[in-house]
Amino acid sequence: MASIVATAANRDGAGHLVAATAVLAVTLGLHLLHSTRAAVRHRKPWWPWSLVAHGEVTCAPYCFFQGT
């Protein structure tokens, strides 16, 4: 949530705000997918790929918003 507030306060345009909100929503969804009790007990075959996606989505803002 702090990243969205900081983006709204420091960036021009709604594009950065929409991107920050989307990244936060996807990261939260993947985090819940990996941390719920049912997910830990019954891992699906695609679980390792979703974990890789979680890492990528977590690091993506550092690559794209570093110089802007």
Image (cartoon, grey):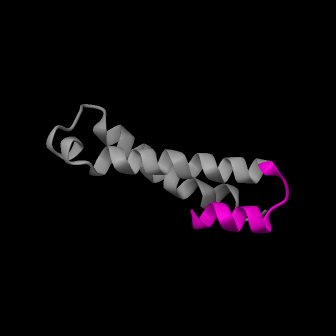
Nearer-the-camera pick, 10 or 54: 10
Residue lying furthest top in this view?
45
Main SS of residues in magenta: helix
Q: On screen, 20 above or below 39?
A: below
Instruction: Using residue 53 as the reference point, say whether residue 45 is left or right of it.
Output: left
Residue 40: give x, y in percent of width and height.
19, 46
Residue at image point 48% right, 50% down: 27
Quarter of the image that includes the C terminus: bottom right
Q: Which residues are magenta?
A: 1-14
Side of 50 where 1 appears, left or right: right
Answer with left or right where residue 38 lies relative to residue 50: left
* Residue drawn 29% across the image and 38% down it: 47
> Where residue 18 sits: x, y (%)?
70, 47
Figure quadrant of residue 10: bottom right
Q: Quadrant of the N terminus?
A: bottom right
Q: 20 or 51: nearer the eye?
A: 20
Find residue 35 and report its horizontal and vertical position in percent. Answer: 28, 51
